[in-house]
Amino acid sequence: MNTSSPISQEQTVTDTPGKQKLTGIFIVGHQDFSIDGLVRMIESSTDSCTVTCVENIQTCMQKLATTRPDVLLVQNEILAEPAELSIQDIFRQDATIRILVFGRNMTDERLYRLVNAGVQGYINERMNGEHVRAALQSIISGQTWIERHIMERFITTQHDFDSLLETRFLNRIDELCTHLSRRETEILCQVIRGLPIKQIAEEVHLSDQGVKMHLSKLFKKFKVSSRNQLILAALDEISPIDHLSLMLRDGLERKLQHLPR
């Protein structure tokens, strides 16, 4: 990301007991009329939200880690090429955050690459307050907010993407198995099936003690201390996404914050 002068603007709406939890919105961009207009649109067209606008990029990234908003709005003009790297840096800080890019000079190719990197939507300078409200509601609910022709491009390439993803999984499984003995691979397979020690022993034709011995070796290799941890560690090893189990946990915890008790 490019850097600019350290100007910041903050507005916080305090949560009230008995009311729906506030939506945290964190805005990053140059301090100009487009930022001011966007803030006004959010204030006038959304209910109960927290809006933070920070211009200095270094300060922004530090504050993002502590603020943990629901939605991050990033001005397109401050995303230096390759913009995907900036998006990846953001997701490394918070894997569950929803990202909406706004601003001018967005080409179809750049938007396609940003969405492919995990951005959930884009709003341009022609969109009004109703568009902004709808875009925020859409990405908060887990949907996307992008032009139809960009979505059609993803649909036409979905088959290729699925094949690529499957190939990556199979390659990671092959790589994982190179570090395991045949017995360890057999037992890991049965552990993932959820079988108890006695049944695993019957399936692989070993004594209970023999199964425990190989389990101990698996625990050591994966640096875990239980079968549940072993399963999660194995999934992390084969996933094309870094830290899949951590992402799942963080996503569930974030979801719980919005569910009624």
Image (spheres, rainbow, N blue to C red):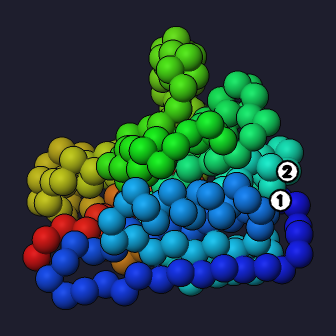
Q: Is 239 on the left-hand or right-hand side of 2?
A: left
Farthest residue, direction top: 156
- Residue 27 visible in the snapshot: yes
Q: Position of residue 110 (x, y in %)?
A: 74, 33
Which residue is nearer to you in this view: 175 or 21?
21
At x 58%, y 22%, the residue is 150
Q: Is 122 on the left-hand or right-hand side of 54?
A: left
The answer to whether the residues at label 2 and label 1 have Cβ atoms under 8 Å apart is yes
| Residue marked by disc 2 | 80
Q: Position of residue 57 (x, y in %)?
A: 79, 71
Q: CA distance from mark 2 to mark 1?
A: 5 Å
At x 37%, y 60%, the residue is 46
Q: Say which quarter of the image contains residue 36.
A: bottom right
Query: How would you rate the neighbour count of disc 2 (Cα within 10 Å): few for under 14, some for 14-19, many for 20 or more?
Result: few
Q: Look at label 2 and name its amino acid.
A: Ala
Tag shown at residue 1: 1
Query: How would you rate the neighbour count of disc 1 (Cα within 10 Å): few for under 14, some for 14-19, many for 20 or more?
Result: some
Q: Position of residue 85 (x, y in %)?
A: 76, 51
Q: Point out the tag, 2 or 1, that comes first from the N-terminus.
A: 1
Q: Say which quarter of the image contains residue 1.
A: bottom right
Q: Is 203 on the left-hand or right-hand side of 50?
A: left
Which residue is nearer to you in this view: 98 or 23?
23
Q: Position of residue 112 (x, y in %)?
A: 65, 29
- Residue 223 visible in the snapshot: no
Asked which secondary structure carries label 1, the reply is loop
Where does the C terminus fall, quadrant-wise? bottom left
At x 89%, y 75%, the residue is 5
Q: Is 148 on the left-hand or right-hand side of 256?
A: right
Q: Look at label 1 and name its amino acid.
A: Met
Q: Say which quarter of the image contains residue 215.
A: bottom left
